[in-house]
């Protein structure tokens, strides 16, 4: 019987260079899709998956993340005093509160890679396997982590990573699984390769930012030499553990947007706007006006 997944790690210490200058003072994880910051979608997903403890691995320059995540009683009191109790209540509902929620903030003083960020959480996790959520991979629809936690309980694999099929010409943007066998939603893999060129890619099954990992990943990270870009790569540590604990890919059912890129952020914004009556009409008006402009 496997131990339950009780902890989610949120690595949020990166520099967000692809979004400069927006990320000079505002952490990438606080950039909003419509009106909700990326980190909030990730927290909501972890809560829906039944996660008990959330560990945020942040950077000393990114204190705004903690300010967003945690309850702000002073701001709520101010809103109430100004006749906006509804707004105060909404803020309280989405915020985490130390009395009710099990939340840890720890620092990665230098962005030495995703693997290193996960290792920084080691002393703060509860016993058993851990989940890792990358907030800039926005997955809408059925909660991806919840699906993975359920699949993990019934699978023999120690490491389970979220995967999706990508066009072969795009393999160099992702970690790619070496697939052994595939059932409906779970793929058994022998390993994974970081950003292979299309001709060298072992499959087209790309890993995206949700992981459920056997706790031994921390030992593998500790002994991991720096990989691509001189950073300690999570992919390398997962590949190291694959032979020992088993590695699976999980085909999630939601829609994934790469909000670490401008194109992905725009797609996510348009996707959500199209589902909102008022915003959808803004899009159609805009397209109509652009067409007229092009025809003129
Ligand atoms: P990314 O590689 O997408 O983020 O890491 P980045 O490095 O901040 O962005 P760019 O490439 O420079 O634009 C995915 C997640 O891992 C975190 C990031 O904050 C992001 O949430 N991360 C990355 C860390 O916490 N520490 C690191 O050393 C690197």
Image (cartoon, rainbow, N blue to C red):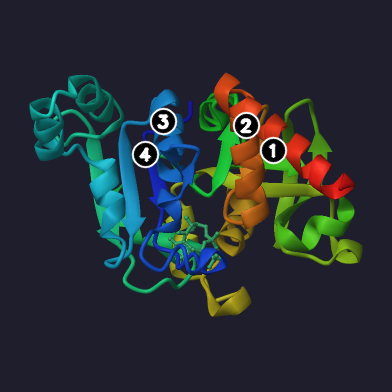
Q: In this view, does 12 lie to the left or right of 211?
A: left
**Mark 1 lies on residue:** 286
- Do labels 3 and 1 touch, CB within 8 Å? no
**Mark 4 lies on residue:** 7
- Do labels 1 and 2 touch, CB within 8 Å? yes
**Mark 3 lies on residue:** 44
Furthest residue in direction right, as rendered: 199
Name the foreground residue: 204 vs 86.
86
Residue sitting at x 28%, y 45%: 68
Q: Which of marks 3 and 4 is nearer the N terminus?
A: 4
Name the foreground residue: 278 vs 252.
278
As helix, strand or loop, the secondary structure at mark 4 comes to strand
Name the foreground residue: 95 vs 176.
95
Residue 75 in picture, x, y percent from top left: 14, 38
As helix, strand or loop, the secondary structure at mark 2 comes to helix
Please determine whether, in this image, residue 32 is positioned above or below residue 41. below
Of marks 3 and 2, the one in the foreground: 2
Q: Is residue 166 left or right of residue 260?
A: right
Residue sitting at x 36%, y 39%: 7
Any part of residue 208 in sight: no
Residue sitting at x 66%, y 31%: 252
Of marks 1 and 4, the one in the foreground: 1
- Do labels 4 and 2 touch, CB within 8 Å? no
Could you classify mark 1 by the number of other residues whose Cα lies within 10 Å: few (under 14), some (14-19), or many (20 or more)? Answer: few
Could you classify mark 2 by the number of other residues whose Cα lies within 10 Å: few (under 14), some (14-19), or many (20 or more)? Answer: some
As helix, strand or loop, the secondary structure at mark 1 comes to helix
- Do labels 3 and 2 touch, CB within 8 Å? no
Q: Quadrant of residue 26?
A: bottom left
Residue 222 in picture, x, y percent from top left: 43, 67
**Mark 2 lies on residue:** 282
Q: Which of marks 3 and 1 is nearer the N terminus?
A: 3
Q: CA–CA distance between discs 3 and 4?
A: 14 Å
């Amino acid at each position: 019987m496997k131990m339950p997944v009780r902890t989610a790690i949120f690595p949020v210490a990166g520099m967000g260079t692809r979004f400069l200058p927006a990320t000079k003072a505002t952490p990438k994880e606080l950039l909003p899709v419509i009106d909700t910051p990326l980190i909030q979608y990730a927290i909501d997903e972890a809560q829906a998956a039944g996660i008990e403890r959330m560990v945020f691995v942040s950077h000393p320059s990114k204190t705004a993340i903690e300010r967003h995540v945690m309850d702000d009683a002073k701001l709520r009191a101010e809103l109430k005093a100004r006749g906006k109790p509804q707004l105060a209540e909404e803020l309280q509902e989405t915020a985490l509160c130390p009395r009710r929620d099990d939340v840890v903030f720890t620092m990665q003083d230098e962005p030495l890679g995703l693997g290193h960020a996960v290792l920084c959480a080691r002393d703060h996790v509860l016993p058993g396997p851990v989940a890792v959520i990358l907030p800039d991979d926005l997955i809408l629809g059925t909660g991806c982590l919840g699906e993975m936690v359920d699949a993990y309980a019934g699978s023999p694999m120690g490491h389970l990573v979220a995967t999706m099929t990508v066009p072969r010409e795009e393999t160099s943007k992702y970690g790619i699984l070496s697939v052994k066998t595939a059932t409906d939603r779970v793929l058994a893999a022998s390993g994974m390769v970081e950003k292979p060129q299309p001709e060298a890619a072992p499959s087209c099954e790309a890993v995206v930012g949700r992981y459920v990992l056997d706790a031994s990943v921390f030992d593998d990270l500790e002994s991991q030499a720096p990989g691509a870009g001189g950073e300690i790569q999570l992919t390398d540590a997962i590949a190291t553990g694959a032979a020992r604990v088993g590695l699976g890919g999980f085909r999630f059912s939601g829609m994934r947007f790469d909000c670490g890129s401008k194109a992905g952020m725009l797609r996510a914004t348009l996707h959500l706007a199209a589902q909102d009556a008022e915003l959808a009409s803004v899009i159609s008006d805009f397209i109509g006006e652009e067409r007229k402009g092009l025809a003129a």
